[in-house]
Amino acid sequence: MKAAKFEYEKASSLKQVQDALRGDCAGVRLMGGSQSLGPMLNLRLVRPGRVLDLSAVPELRQVSAAEGRVRIGAAVTHAQIEDGVYEPLRGHMMQKVAGRIAYRGVRNRGTLGGSLAHADPAADWVLTCAALGARVNVRGAQGLRPVPMGEFMLAAYTTVLEAGEFIESVDVPWVSATARWGYYKFTRKVGEFADASCACYFDPATRTARVVIGAMEGAPRSLPELAVKVAAQGAAALEGEAIASALKPYLEQRDEAHQVLFRTVVERSLQQALGVKG
């Protein structure tokens, strides 16, 4: 199928985006890299009267660092993060994850903000931002409001974004010398969405410890007790049934094969963070 007829406009400023969303914006859809919206248009799952392309808005393509955090513009692409185009993200967990997203063609077009707004439960950025404790900066008629990533995604393909709002930027922690992380996922073939995934992030300097699983029915799920145990005990925490016990509340309705997949992605993600060879 092909998309139903719509008007296309390429925004060149943040003000142009805000003006387009004032008043009755029900027929307007925002587009970043079109990697999520494009297929939905072609399948006619959405039929907007107007598509506003944000990919060239300068304010949404900037990356800066201040006060222990890195602010990433919503229109920054996966490939730009992967390639280290922006100095604050070189060597960051975000750079490591970006290179594993789908295919290079998708990474060239897909954007951080577009991925988070689409809120696919198996998406890489949804999980990574949850593990990092990221903050999503949402712009609307009332100004800018920061939303913790743990509160941003409500369910599969559902976020707190209201009519007239859009993601302006995302704040992630600056990587300190003591920070350690891991990210592991299983896919049926390279480039596809994950069947099971896990991201973890530890930083003694900020007393941060997070272990989060993705590719669930909805938003990523945190495993706080396991995270605390790993932070305190290191590799010893991976012995026995610690991982299986942490996952049990979330996997009771899944078959044994899926349970094994999730136990494995958690174990391998933590091994990466701890520098332990599997």
Image (cartoon, rainbow, N blue to C red):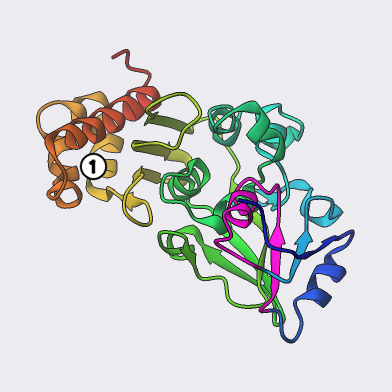
Q: Is 17 in front, or is 61? A: 17
Badge 1 marks a residue whose secondary structure is helix
Q: Residue furthest right?
A: 12
Say above or below: 118 vs 102: below
Q: Residue 138: tell me if it is visible.
A: yes
Q: Is 185 in front, or is 236? A: 185
Residue 241 lies in the magenta-colored region: no
Say above or below: 49 vs 142: above
Q: Is 14 in front, or is 71? A: 14
Q: Is residue 177 left or right of residue 211?
A: right
Q: Which corner quadrant of the image does residue 110 belong to?
A: top right
Q: Residues within 10 Å of mark 1 (few under 14, many from 20)?
A: many
Q: How many marks?
A: 1
Classify the position of the C terminus by image quarter.
Answer: top left
Say above or below: 118 vs 175: below
Residue 144 spot, x, y in % from top left: 69, 72
Residue 100 spot, x, y in % from top left: 53, 28
Which residue is pictured at 61% across the width and 31% down the height? 95
Residue 35 lies in the magenta-colored region: yes
Q: Is residue 103 left or right of residue 195?
A: right
Residue 147 spot, x, y in % from top left: 54, 66
Q: Which corner quadrant of the image does residue 51 belong to?
A: bottom right
Which residue is pictured at 49% across the width and 55% down the height? 119
Magenta stretch, residue numbers: 26-47
The three-letter amino acid code for the residue at tag 1 is Leu
Q: Is residue 138 left or right of residue 238?
A: right
Which residue is pictured at 72% across the width and 34% down the height? 80
Which residue is pictured at 14% across the width and 26% down the height? 239
Q: Residue 68: tell me if it is visible.
A: no
Say above or below: 94 vs 48: above
Which residue matches tag 1?
226
Residue 103 spot, x, y in % from top left: 59, 28
